Image: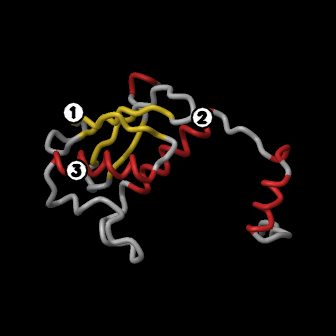
Amino acid sequence: MINEIPKKRLTERLKDWDDNPNMRTDASYYEVENSILNYLTKILNIKKGSVLIYKEYGIPNLFNVETSKLKNDIFEIIQKYEPRLKVEDVVTSSNNIDQFLPKFIIKAKLSSDNSDFNLDSYIDTDRKIEVDLPKDNI
């Protein structure tokens, strides 16, 4: 089945949304949580230099980077590109998947209500950065 084609352009729909506050709905905590997890997974897997209009965006090549440099890069990228979070610290920890690959604990607060929003981030065996909720919070 083909999705219905919107009757208005995106800018027109955004204007309607802005003009009619009753069209807005608050996202649930679960939706915000998933949105942040998905977005962080995407931005932390963009390789530095791969975005043509902004060469500084992204994480350096994971094969040649020191853990301390990667920890700082993760902190700076989240701080700069995820305004829904206020990063307090990024610390390294042991990785249960592979002892030679680092795990990072991201200590943050939600900007909206200043509540704790801590995350686990690790490099998997495919050299992809995964982001998830801490297992003890689930």
Tell me the quadrant of the picture where the N terminus can be found: bottom right
- Residue type indicated by callout 3: Leu
Identify the residue shown where x is 31% and y is 71%.
49
Element at label 1: strand
Q: Nearer the viewer, mark 3 or mark 1?
A: 3
Q: Around disc 1, counting alpha carbons within 10 Å, would you say few (fewer than 14), some (14 to 19), or many (20 or more)? A: some
Is residue 6 placed above or below 90 in the rendered structure?
A: below
Q: Which mark is residue 93?
A: 1
Identify the residue shown where x is 21% and y is 33%.
93
- Asked whether disc 1 touches disc 2, contact meaning CB atoms under 8 Å apart, the reply is no
Q: How was this image coloured?
A: secondary structure
Q: Quadrant of residue 68?
A: top left
Q: On the image, numbered disc 2 is attached to which residue?
A: 30
- Residue type indicated by callout 1: Ser
Identify the residue shown where x is 46% and y is 48%.
82
Element at label 2: helix
Is residue 76 placed above or below 93 in the rendered structure?
A: below
Residue 22, image x, y percentages: 85, 43
**What is the distance, in whole Å, between disc 3 and disc 1 at their CAs?**
13 Å
Which comes sooner in the sequence, label 3 or label 1? 3
Q: On the image, numbered disc 3 is attached to which residue?
A: 70
Q: Around disc 3, counting alpha carbons within 10 Å, would you say few (fewer than 14), some (14 to 19), or many (20 or more)? A: some
Which comes sooner in the sequence, label 1 or label 2? 2
Q: Around disc 2, counting alpha carbons within 10 Å, would you say few (fewer than 14), some (14 to 19), or many (20 or more)? A: few
Identify the residue shown where x is 45% and y is 26%.
116
Q: Quadrant of residue 7?
A: bottom right
- Residue type indicated by callout 2: Tyr
**Visible in this render: residue 107?**
yes
Element at label 3: helix
List the single residue furthest toward the front: 19
Q: Which mark is residue 62?
A: none
**Visible in this render: residue 1?**
no
